[in-house]
């Protein structure tokens, strides 16, 4: 009965909730053994709910794909149930789809078994399972359930009464008055039991609904307190405790331990500061952690109103984005060092002026190869870029930037979307490390992990790269891209309208 109530919660009214600032679906491009795959995980709006898994193989060498959800870490992370067979498209044999029930909140993974011409391979894609809203019950369904309940209640009351009244009476005979009295007593008892059952079920319903709404609230992007002290040191801390549901324990939540965060690309926080309005200035910084407080000595930067996005990953692999804002005076800081980067350029226009070229400090340029087709919301795509020298020849001096050829941040102009993505996809690399560790070599929670190790290279990087992503809704977006050339991070920015 409890599972029934949980499923019925899908129909309860509630409030809309966004985690990771409005970009929930997961996009991944990478290898499962010898097979190159493009994966999209469309997460359900509610939990429990059905996730849609789409997989495209780069070559026609994949025969079948089986998928199964399980926890990303801890108990059960290596105890998958029987995987579901993804359906192969009849029109496109390289395209597979599957539907999976997501029954839990928190850090999960979608494990895939790939079979093909080159044998069997496995890969796991980390996902952050959270409810974005609860759905109101349709009026017709509410009316139908009321009619069914009334019918069942009348049956539960009248049938015992009829049995007592006529069960011992010969056919055609008139029931004695004593039978009628006993029947009224039985019907009264039956009605009382029916009302008590209704009350108990409604109480259980309310408990489950309260727990559901609590979980929806827990997994919203946490608010951050942001202060400037000592003239140029920015301090960021969560405005309150960050709570995450305990997987498998209804109603139980634990506070995220800020001393046990997983480094992502070698940093415990990726801090993005964007000036508003107009997004004419953007900084990608990496504060130092001291307990639950993060601090960063700011570089030289102009005064303005800045929106703050701080990406962290808890020890279970769940990604969080702290959001806040801060008013800054002109900062007379030092030059950028290490992996810190910035971009300063033109303000956004209204209507937006779409751009495909962004110039780098030395006159080289980055080009977005977006084609002529309009961008569509909720459609997976490859955002392709190339870097050119002043004379138009391919750049030859790109180096790994925090283990990747490039990083990007996608921000909707109304701030409803913030996504920090990489050429491997939209998930955090720390979570991807955990997912792959379950299939290959296990790493300690503080290790930089396999994804970083495999990405690290001292050789020059290709001047052409791409990001798998899908814009979650129509609107105007600014895309910030960072690369590294000759030991120095450099930034570019592009504007786009999504239909």
Image: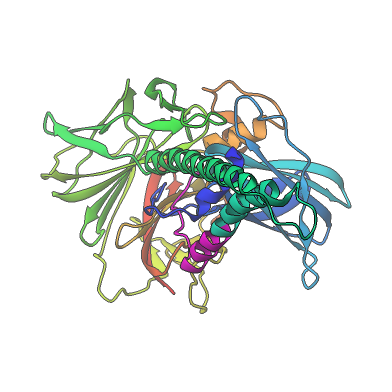
Q: Is residue 452 above or below residue 414?
A: above
Check the picture and name the quadrant holding the C terminus.
bottom left
Q: Residue furthest bottom?
A: 372
Q: Position of residue 408 (x, y in %)?
A: 44, 52
Residue 369 in view in this figure:
yes
Which image quadrant for residue 257? top left
**In the image: residue 145, left or right of residue 366:** right
Which residue shows up at 13% across the image and 30% down it? 229
Number of numbered tags placed on the structure image? 0
Q: Position of residue 351 (x, y in %)?
A: 28, 76
Q: Say how the picture is coloured.
A: rainbow
Q: Is residue 215 above or below residue 45?
A: above
Check the picture and name the quadrant holding the N terminus.
top right
**In the image: residue 261, left or right of residue 90:** left
In the image, 165 versus 52, the foreground residue is 165
Which residue shows up at 47% across the image and 60% down it? 137
Q: Is residue 428 magenta?
A: no
Q: Which residues are magenta?
A: 129-148
Q: Is residue 136 magenta?
A: yes
In the image, 493 versus 435, the foreground residue is 435
Which residue shows up at 58% across the image and 51% down it? 49
Q: Position of residue 371 (x, y in %)?
A: 52, 75
Which residue shows up at 40% across the image and 60% down it? 364
Q: Position of residue 261 (x, y in %)?
A: 44, 26
Residue 405 in view in this figure:
no
In the image, 159 versus 471, the foreground residue is 159
């Amino acid at each position: 009965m409890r599972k029934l109530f949980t499923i019925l919660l899908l129909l309860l009214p509630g409030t809309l909730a966004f985690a990771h600032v409005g970009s929930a679906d997961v996009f991944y491009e990478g290898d499962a053994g010898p097979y190159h795959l493009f994966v999209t995980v469309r997460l359900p709006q509610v939990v429990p709910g059905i996730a849609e898994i789409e997989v495209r193989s780069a070559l026609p060498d994949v025969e079948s794909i089986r998928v199964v959800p399980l926890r990303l870490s801890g108990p059960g992370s290596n105890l998958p149930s029987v995987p579901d067979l993804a359906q192969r498209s009849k029109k496109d044999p390289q395209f597979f789809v599957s539907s999976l029930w997501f029954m839990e909140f928190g850090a999960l993974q979608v494990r895939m078994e790939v079979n093909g011409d080159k044998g069997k391979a496995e890969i796991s894609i980390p996902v952050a399972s959270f409810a974005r809203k609860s759905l109101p019950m349709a009026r017709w369904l509410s009316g139908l359930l009321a009619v069914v309940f009334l019918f069942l209640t009348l049956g539960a009351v009248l049938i015992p009464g009829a049995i007592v009244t006529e069960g011992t009476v010969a056919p055609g005979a008139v029931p004695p008055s004593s039978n009628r009295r006993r029947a009224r007593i039985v019907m009264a008892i039956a009605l009382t039991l029916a009302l008590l059952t209704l009350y108990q079920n409604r109480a259980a319903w309310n408990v489950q609904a309260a727990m559901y709404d609590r979980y929806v609230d827990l997994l919203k992007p946490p608010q951050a307190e942001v202060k400037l002290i000592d003239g140029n040191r920015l301090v960021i801390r969560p405005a309150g405790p960050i709570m995450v549901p305990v997987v498998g324990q209804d109603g139980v939540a634990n506070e995220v331990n800020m001393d046990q965060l997983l480094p992502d690309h070698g940093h415990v926080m990726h801090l993005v500061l964007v000036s508003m309005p107009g997004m004419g200035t953007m900084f990608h910084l990496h504060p130092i952690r001291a307990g639950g407080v993060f601090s960063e000595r700011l570089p030289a930067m102009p005064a303005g109103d800045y929106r703050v996005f701080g990406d962290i990953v808890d020890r279970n692999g769940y990604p969080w984005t702290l959001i806040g804002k801060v008013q800054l005076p002109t900062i007379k800081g030092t030059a950028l060092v290490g992996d810190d980067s910035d971009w300063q350029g033109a303000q956004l226009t209204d209507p937006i002026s779409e751009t495909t070229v962004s110039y780098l400090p030395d006159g080289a340029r980055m080009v977005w190869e977006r084609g002529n087709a309009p961008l569509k919301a909720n459609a997976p795509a490859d955002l392709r870029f190339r870097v050119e020298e002043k004379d138009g020849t391919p750049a030859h001096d790109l180096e790994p930037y925090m283990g990747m050829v490039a990083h990007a941040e996608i921000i909707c102009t109304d701030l409803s979307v913030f996504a920090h993505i990489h050429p491997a996809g939209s998930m955090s690399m720390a979570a991807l490390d955990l997912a792959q560790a379950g299939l290959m070599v296990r790493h300690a929670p503080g290790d930089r992990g396999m994804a970083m190790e495999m990405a690290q290279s001292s050789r020059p990087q290709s001047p052409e790269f791409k990001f798998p992503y899908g814009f979650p809704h129509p609107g105007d977006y600014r895309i910030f891209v960072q690369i590294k050339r000759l030991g120095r991070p450099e930034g570019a920015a592009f504007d786009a309208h999504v239909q």
